[in-house]
Amino acid sequence: MNMVILLSGFIVLLCIVCTKFSNKIGIPSLFLFIALGLLFGSDGILKIDFDNYLFAENVCSIALIFIMFYGGFGTRWKTAKPVAVKSMILSTIGVVATAFCVGLFCYYVLKISFLESLLIGSVISCTDATSVFSILRSKNLSLKYRTDALLEVESGSNDPCAYMMTMIIVSIINGENSSVGDIVLMVIAQFVFAIIFGVGIALLSLWILKKFPLISNEFCTLFIFGIILISYALPVVFGGNGYLSTYITGIIMGNNYIKQKKNLVQFYDSLTTIMQMYIFFLLGLLAYPSKMLPIIPKALIIVLFLTFIARPLVITLFLKPFGCSFKQIGVVSWAGLRGASSIVFSITATVNATNLENDIFHIVFFIVLISISMQGSLLPLISKKLNMIDETSDVRKTFTDYQQENDIQFIRVKVHENQKWCNKMLRDLDIPPQTLIVTVERGGKTIIPNGTTTIEANDVLILTAPPFKDTKNMEMSEIEISHDHDWIDKPIKELNLPTDTLIVMIKRHGLTIVPNGDTIVQLNDVLVLETIEVLV
């Protein structure tokens, strides 16, 4: 057990090193994670014997649940909405068309049995969100005509359709759903229950968070954790698509106000990053390079057909009617990276389908290796050659955790009757340079002010200003006021503070107070002090 824990920690550190190394050499870090798994595996240096497909399927499927949720949670719907129709067409009809193109190619050219051909096509029909997100974000690759948003939504939403097709083909191979009526009912159930539960769980969760504020950020994080699991499992019980339900839940919750969203983003961003590392490492560990040698010619032909014929054909067919340029179609075609989802679905097929004649897992594994290394590495170059890079934008705007790098800081000021701003128009206020009053909160309403807006008593003003960044000579400290402290019950102006020290904030009974000279220090107050080191 201790060796497993030690190895797990070692793997995380190695993956972090690989991430830094990959940015320098231009190879996607996900490829290096897989390479680490191969290096540790049965044919590698450490010779770790791991061939438990069922365990790998369970672990990777659970990880995909959180990756799917965060893919939806992190997608900014306002940015993605203009391309939503195109993205949804590609992630549904486009996935089906790609699967059939590859399936027919495998059947007629490679002479693989018809059902196994369709199974291979279904498994590799989806663009992998993890791979696409990783490339776009790590390279900060902003694309013209909202192409980056289109790719984000397409890759984030097409796994459910590919998974559904995979399970349909597996059920036909096993003789469980042989009639057209059975297949139609299965498809309807997959979509209907996924949408119903995805939307319902999201709205109910938002209502609970609003009506019953949770005690702390930690409980909110755990609450969302449970919601993610329920949003997947509940529709599955009724025959629905758990991945689609989870993705829908993520989109709705991510694009609504949640008080602790910043903390949620930080937690689930870290969680999904770790899961991505372990998924790709585990998949590499499961693969045997020696078993890939016989299937390389077949897999190489499939990946070349998929990359240069099937994907461009499908993208052109469905995007050209929207008036998309061939440059945009070219980038979207090239960005169809295959990744962890395809390999996980191939494991699902291997575990559940009976009497397969081909080693689908290693075929798909090799396809993913080529796709990530070739397409992922060359995507920035292809985008530049096609003049599709938008230098004026930021790809992070597609995500709900995006914050502008202009660094605007918001300040809240409440106006009292005896203050000099009270009953004056905005244009007459003496406010500091580079400061702007952006909103006025009055009587439960929010007002967008102009120069003639009159400030009234009890108005709450929201100001913006550039933040101060150079804190190298500034030290912050806290003092808790106990019953025997000399400062208790004294106003701040009477305290004997050093000339280089200022009380900038008081924490009192869960409230934050910005003090002035007349503020009385009370028992159990926590004073935040700022001390400036005078540089000579």
Image: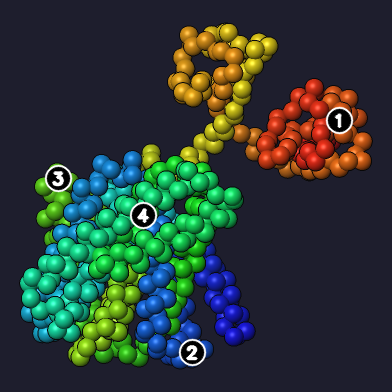
Mark 4 or mark 2, which is nearer to you? 4
Mark 4 or mark 3, which is nearer to you? 4
Q: Quadrant of residue 237?
A: bottom left
Report how far apart the C-alphas of labels 4 and 1 lie in the structure.
50 Å
Instruction: Give residue 383's position: percent from left, percent from top.
Output: 30, 53
Q: Is residue 396 above or below residue 117?
A: above
Colour scheme employed for the rendering of this structure: rainbow
The earlier-in-sequence mark between 4 and 2 is: 2
Residue marked by disc 3: 322
Q: Tell me the number on the disc at residue 201.
A: 4
Relative depth, front residue between 99 and 433: 99
Q: Is residue 535 left or right of residue 83?
A: right
The earlier-in-sequence mark between 1 and 3 is: 3
Look at label 3 and name its amino acid.
Answer: Phe
What residue sits 37% from the left and 78% below the top?
A: 57
Q: Is residue 506 left or right of residue 170?
A: right
Report how far apart the C-alphas of labels 2 and 3 lie in the structure.
51 Å
Residue marked by disc 1: 489
Report how far apart the C-alphas of labels 2 and 1 lie in the structure.
67 Å
The earlier-in-sequence mark between 2 and 1 is: 2
